[in-house]
């Protein structure tokens, strides 16, 4: 597994996915940075998340007042090592899961809860 290659592939997939969004969402989506990490740190996992988590939205959702003193700024974290393991080494599956995970976390940025994400096929 070449994590540098996977990060480039994931970044390309996120950009392509953003380009497919409706114009009204595309501009807003471009405002939330995506950070690619090989694996989630223990600090990120805490007691709340499993080590095989694929992605995570952190920070205030879009439109909410942001106070960085209370935590991280709004961003999407994608864990390329976990995504690759989930894809069982298949580039096509990896890219599809990056797309789904990005859209799922972007939905959290838009303030959608798990039920609303499921209604949109982003569970």
Image (cartoon, helix red, strand yellow):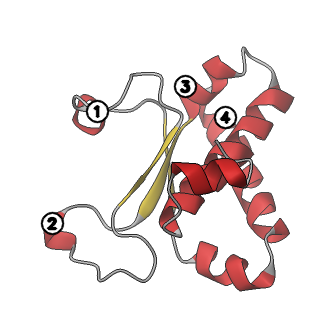
Q: Earlier in the sequence, mark 3 or mark 1?
A: 1
Q: Is residue 22 visible?
A: yes
Residue wearing tag 3: 82
Instruction: Report if the CB atoms under discs 3 and 2 are less than 8 Å apart.
Output: no
- The quarter of the picture where residue 39 lies is top left
Residue 71 percent across, percent down from the top left: 20, 61
> Contact (CB < 8 A) between labels 4 and 3?
no
Q: Residues within 10 Å of mark 2 (few under 14, many from 20)?
A: few
Q: CA distance from mark 2 to mark 4?
A: 32 Å
Numbered tag placed on residue 48 in the rendering: 1
For mark 1, does the 10 Å Cα neighbourhood hold few (<14), some (14 to 19), or many (20 or more) residues? few
Q: Position of residue 33 (x, y in %)?
A: 50, 66
Q: Which label belongs to residue 23?
A: none
Under circle 4, the secondary element is: helix
Residue at label 4? 6
Indicate which disc, 3 or 2, sits on the residue closer to the N terminus: 2
The quarter in which the C terminus is drawn is top right
Q: From the viewer's perspective, is 46 left or right of 33?
A: left
Q: Which mark sits nearer the N-terminus, 2 or 4?
A: 4
Q: CA distance from mark 1 to mark 2?
A: 18 Å
Foreground label between 4 and 3: 3
């Amino acid at each position: 597994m070449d994590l540098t290659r996977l990060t480039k592939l994931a970044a390309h997939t996120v950009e392509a996915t953003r380009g497919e969004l409706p114009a009204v969402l595309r501009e807003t989506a471009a405002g939330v940075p995506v950070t690619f990490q090989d694996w989630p740190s223990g600090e990120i996992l805490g007691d709340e998340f499993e080590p095989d988590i694929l992605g995570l939205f952190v920070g205030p959702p879009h439109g909410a007042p942001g106070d960085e003193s209370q935590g991280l700024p709004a961003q999407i974290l994608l864990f390329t090592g976990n995504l690759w393991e989930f894809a069982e080494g298949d580039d096509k599956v990896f890219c599809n899961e990056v797309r789904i995970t990005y859209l799922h976390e972007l939905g959290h940025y838009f303030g959608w809860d798990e039920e609303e994400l499921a209604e949109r096929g982003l569970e």
